[in-house]
Image (cartoon, helix red, strand yellow):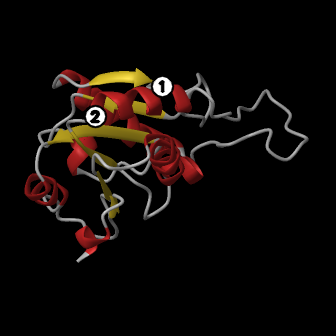
Amino acid sequence: GKDPAIVFEDVNIERTANGLLWGSFTNSGQSCTSIERVYVQESIYDELVKKLSYNIGKIKVSDENRNFTEPGDCDMGSMTSESQIQIVEDHILDAVQKGAKILTGGKRTHGSLHFPPTLMVDVDHTMKIVMEETFGPILPVMKFKTEKEAVLLANDSPYGLSASVWSKDLVRAE
């Protein structure tokens, strides 16, 4: 899937940021239902991006040189293969060349299969990171104005495995 998350302005920012990060970076983003793109209502976009960036900094990423002996020592492990890291790197390069900005992460740990959680902004639907399956620890975040726009953007994909809507308004689920 190319699993979108739509975030409306009525959410609890802290809870939503934590949920989005968990949904995107569990198993280093290598889960079929990992969140791969986020659409945020423009009125809370800056605040949510700031919170995502701050909270990503708290994620403890393993590497081959660290010995984790206690539960909770590590929040995120390595990627599964060199070929999958190459896809992630290709998608990031394509996005940056087309104007995206990397706020956190963006480069693998040299000589390993470890890739830090990465937050990207200024992404759009011309970029592989938004339109193709990345299957890695990358979270591209985009703005939307109206609910109709958000649904159109979320559905602009040939992939359709999962999606999530973040709102206090239960009517949106209908």
Secondary structure beneath disc 2? helix
Q: Residue at x 37, y 42 (%)?
A: 87
User: Residue 58 at x, y = what percent?
Assistant: 63, 30
Q: Residues within 10 Å of mark 1 (few under 14, many from 20)?
A: some
- What's the residue type where badge 2 is placed? Tyr
Q: What secondary structure is marked by label 1?
A: loop
Percent position (x, y) of residue 147? Answer: 14, 56
Please identify, in this view, whether the residue under mark 2 or under mark 1 is nearer the observer: 2
Q: Position of residue 4 (x, y in %)?
A: 29, 56
| As drawn, 10 above or below 129 | below
Examine the image and state in which quarter residue 160 appears: bottom left
User: What label does residue 45 carry, if any?
Assistant: 2
Along the line of sight, the residue nearer the viewer: 82 or 26: 26
Dot 1 amino acid type: Gly
Residue found 29% across the figure and 38% down from its top: 141
Label 1, on which residue? Answer: 105
Image point 13% across, 43% down: which residue?
A: 125
Pointer 2 local density, CA inside 10 Å: few below 14, some 14–19, many at least 20: some
